[in-house]
Image (tube, rainbow, N blue to C red):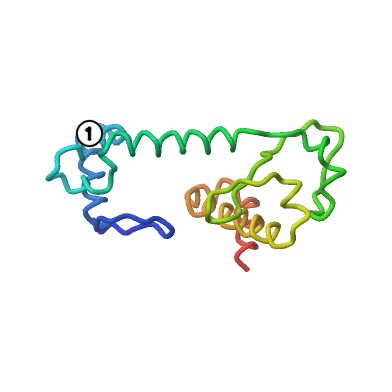
Amino acid sequence: MKFERKPGFRLKSNPQIVGEVCHQLEQDGKLTPKDLVNASRDKNAPLHNEFEWRNGVAAEKYREVQAGYIIRSVAVSITEISSEITTLNLNITESKEEIARFYHAVERDGEFDNIMNIAVNDDKTSKLLKLCKKDALAFKEKYNVLRSVMPKLFNALDELEG
């Protein structure tokens, strides 16, 4: 089987080797992140160098991953902020209480900004909309096998590429 690197992912290892290691773990029983870490612990393991093995550094990086998760978990009521977000021209239904993620990272530096600041900044709005399109197209690629079950959704996603 020929394995390739999915666009947007950065790895040090050859994608064929990555795919083979993952495929072997799957064949041996299951493929989970924990299994992949364990299979890569040995210094001679093919994917050993993909991981940070210095515990102090790894722990700090994981705390940053956790912090990002915490920040992305913050949501607000759309009806509460709808009057302040006019530049996005959102179609907001007042009769249904909806919540939306409040903080977004639109820059590569990982800094988060709230949706109200993004909405009044044309550059940040444009970047958020590009991220939205990228996520929608990634969804389309990931679930393309379901195209025949949900044709309307996939037709709308097809229009994003047009």
Q: Is residue 94 left or right of residue 10?
A: right
Instruction: Identify the amino acid type marked 1.
Output: Asn
Work out whether 16 lies above or below 50: below
For the C terminus, the image quarter is: bottom right
Q: Residue at x 26, y 33 (%)?
A: 35
Picture layout, residue 5 above or below residue 52: below
Quadrant assignment for the N terminus:
bottom left
* Whole-percent x, y for residue 36 in the image: 26, 38
Quarter of the rendering containing residue 13: bottom left
Which residue lies most toward the bottom here? 162
The x and y percentages for residue 142 are 47, 50
The residue closer to the viewer here, 66 or 128, is 66
Q: Nearer the viewer, residue 143 or 58?
A: 58
Q: How many marks?
A: 1
162 left or right of 11 in image: right
Mark 1, Cα crowd under 10 Å, few <14 / some 14-19 / many 20+, is few
* Relative image position of residue 53 (x, y in whole percent): 25, 39
From the top left corner, tell me how far across and down residue 77 is, in percent: 77, 33
Residue carrying label 1: 38
Task: Please identify the quarter of the rendering in which residue 52 is found.
Answer: top left
Q: Is residue 86 left or right of residue 104?
A: right
Q: In this view, does 21 lie to the left or right of 138?
A: left
Q: In which quarter of the image is residue 100?
A: top right
Residue at x-position 83% and y-position 35%? 80
- The one nearer the camera, 134 or 52, is 52
Disc 1, SS = helix
Q: In this view, does 12 lie above or below 85?
A: below
Q: Residue furthest front?
A: 56
